[in-house]
């Protein structure tokens, strides 16, 4: 039985790109203070490793989760379903995740 590979962390990206973890964080968060060649090295390392930010860790650091909860009723009807879908699409476009629960 094989052990599953450990998901890459920010330190792995930093090591591969030859930068600090703070620089990786700045690239991920879109800081304009990073030199273009450094940004490119970090982005290539992210791609090569398949790195994805840890959403739980980001929520702890930022003090917010980026999740929008929608509670509604009659979700099988067109109107309410359309509203839920619109909220989910708008949230995704703004960098949030929307989840919904129907009370019906």
Image: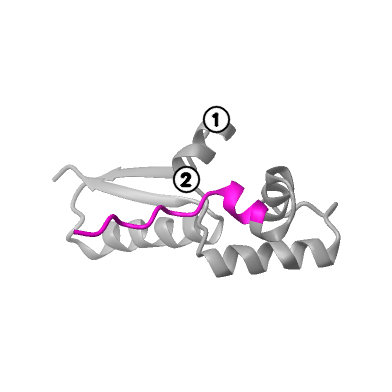
Decide which of 67, 53 is in the foreground and name it.
Answer: 53
Q: Position of residue 2 (x, y in %)?
A: 24, 59
* 46 lies above or below 15: below
Please give the residue where the numbered disc 2 appears in the rendered image.
Answer: 55
Q: At numbered mark 2, what does the secondary structure look like: helix, strand or loop?
A: helix
Q: Residues within 10 Å of mark 1 (few under 14, many from 20)?
A: few
Q: At numbered mark 1, what does the secondary structure look like: helix, strand or loop?
A: loop
Q: Main secondary structure of the magenta part?
A: loop
Q: Position of residue 6 (x, y in %)?
A: 40, 52
Q: How many marks?
A: 2
Q: Position of residue 71 (x, y in %)?
A: 29, 42
Is the C-beta separation of discs 2 and 1 under 8 Å? no
Decide which of 103, 68 is in the foreground and name it.
Answer: 68
Residue found at x 50% / y 64%: 50
Direction from residue 28 to residue 96 in the image, left or right? left
Direction from residue 76 to residue 46 in the image, left or right? right
Q: Looking at the rendering, which quadrant does residue 44 occupy?
A: bottom right
Q: Which residues are magenta?
A: 1-15
Q: Position of residue 25 (x, y in %)?
A: 67, 47
Front position among marks 2 and 1: 2
| Residue found at the very far left of the displayed protein | 104
Please give the residue where the numbered disc 1 appears in the rendered image.
Answer: 63
Residue found at x 66% / y 52%: 14
Q: Earlier in the sequence, mark 2 or mark 1?
A: 2
* 101 lies above or below 75: above
Residue found at x 76% / y 62%: 39
* 37 lies above or below 15: below
């Amino acid at each position: 039985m094989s052990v599953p590979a450990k998901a890459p962390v920010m330190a792995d990206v930093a090591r591969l790109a030859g930068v600090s973890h703070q620089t990786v964080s700045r690239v991920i968060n879109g800081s304009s203070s990073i030199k273009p060649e450094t940004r490119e090295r970090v982005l290539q390392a992210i791609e090569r490793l398949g790195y994805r930010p840890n959403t739980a860790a980001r929520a702890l650091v930022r003090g917010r989760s980026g999740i929008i909860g929608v509670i509604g009723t009659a979700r099988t009807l067109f109107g309410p379903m359309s509203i839920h879908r619109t909220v989910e699409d708008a949230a995704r476009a703004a960098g949030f995740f929307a989840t919904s629960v129907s009370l019906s």
